[in-house]
Amino acid sequence: MTDQNTNEAAGWNFDHSYSGLPELFYSRISTNPVPSPKLVILNAALAASLGLDADALRSEEGIAAFAGNEMPAGSQPIAQAYAGHQFGHFTMLGDGRALLIGEHITPAGERFDIQLKGSGRTPYSRGGDGKASLGPMLREYMISEAMHGLGIPTTRSLAVITTGEAVYRETELPGAVLTRIAASHIRVGTFQYAAGGGTAEDLRALADYTWNRHYADADPGDNRYLALLKEVIKRQGELIAKWQLVGFIHGVMNTDNMTLSGETIDYGPCAFMDAYDPATVFSSIDSQGRYAYGNQPNIAAWNLARLAEALLPLLHEEEEKAVELAEDAIKGFIDSFYTHWMSGMRAKLGLFHEEADDDSLIKALLDLMTEHQADYTNTFKALTFGKLEGTPIFGSEEFREWHARWQERLGRQQESADEAQELMKASNPAVIPRNHRVEEALEAAVEEGDLVVMERLLAVLRSPYAHTPEQEEYAALSEPSAYPYRTFCGT
């Protein structure tokens, strides 16, 4: 049995507010013990921010908790139910391979879900084994930490352990469990589930809970549920803008992968764009480009419309009026997204204030980047430091004309050139998790048991705006390949 004193030493402080919702929304479950859990990686910095003791988490008892073999004192495992539109098709879903062991309350009073991902079957597994393999769990660890370093709201990864058992996909793979930390796991799909399978009171209970957990400081006005919809729309507008600004492609923007908290969740077939092209798709299953980079804002709006549909019974007692309120709210997404995106793009170009022609200036640069297949991240970095050589885009007459136009625009603002450069340095990362670097780290970790490659990559990704000499090698592009890069859902 687990030593309760050891678990107390770890600092776990569990609450279970989600279990106060109607039982429609979850199932209480038993854990699925694994034969030989071993710690692969622990996020010590995240542990410290949560008020947890890293040494206790590394102990035999701490690892047993990460594996689901022995739960920490005070935990009450549940699997959450939800639904979702997956590639546009509605499906009843749920935590088919994850369990929520509780909501950890930090010493500062913050509340975070603690979820074990890959922990085995639940009532929502739909015939699956509920397991996960090491590669996809390490990918989520790396990318979620990179997103955090970039300042993008995201779930985070506390630990990855191997289970000592194999999982079978196309080949035999080492089993693993990831411990995910989230503001909550409430999704658009959770509301779809309530609207489709629950009562009006179930839906109201979920909406009230979500408001109190994530938006209690917002003004509810005279219609809390409309205010909830509008607040979620605002957060998602800001989130998707931040994705676009760094070239992040989620890859599977199903409605069950959009959170009400405004965090990025689920890092299955995600990747970062190299050459700028709005049509960029990496996911092997997105053959139609539904979730392409340039389509992400439209898909976010579509997903939010599904949330609005689920909330209709709460928005107004008259359906026609409820629809009108919902449609007006959804229109706010484009304003929210565009405002944040334009603000971010101005910052990437060192512009402190708005001018009417800024949209045209930005679009002209992006069009040139598309035409010349220019690397998105490195082009903005080159502009930041004035190193405009070595790539086709900088040698073109069209770019020279654009550059003169940009310099004229910079000259019309009161801020100095040094101030503009500092703004650009803070807005243009030196490094992103380049796809070839991620694959290199995963291969070393999974195939050779060597974590050094991943740890070095994580070290530079923690401070992507530092622009240090050590980051230069990680900014380099991969060698040309005859085959396009492809990602796969982590199963």
Image (cartoon, grey):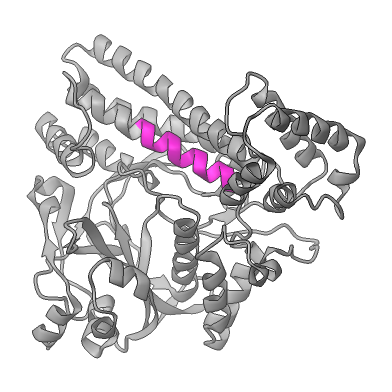
Compared to 299, does 171 lie above or below?
Answer: below
Residue at point 52%, 87% (across, down)? 449
Residue 242 included in the magenta stretch of the image: yes
Say whether residue 223 is left or right of residue 299. Answer: left
Residue 164 visible, this orientation: no
Q: Report x, y in % for residue 461.
A: 54, 65
Residue at point 63%, 30% (across, down)? 414
For the residue pair 216 and 253, the one nearer the viewer reads as 216
Compared to 89, does 27 lie above or below?
Answer: below
Compared to 254, does 440 lie above or below?
Answer: below
Compared to 327, does 309 lie above or below?
Answer: below
Residue 5 visible, this orientation: yes
Labels in figure, total: 0
Say whether residue 363 is left or right of residue 149. Answer: right
Residue at point 20%, 36% (across, down)? 217
Residue 66 included in the magenta stretch of the image: no
Q: Report x, y in % for residue 158.
A: 34, 70
Q: Report x, y in % for residue 149.
A: 48, 59
The quarter holding residue 315 reads: top left
In the rendered view of the protein, which quadrant contains the C terminus?
A: bottom left
Report the predominant secondary structure element of the magenta stretch.
helix
Q: Report x, y in % for residue 468.
A: 63, 66
Say whether residue 386 is left or right of residue 9. Answer: right
In the rendered view of the protein, which quadrant contains the N terminus?
A: bottom left
The quarter holding residue 60 reads: bottom left
User: Start and end of the magenta stretch?
Assistant: 233-246
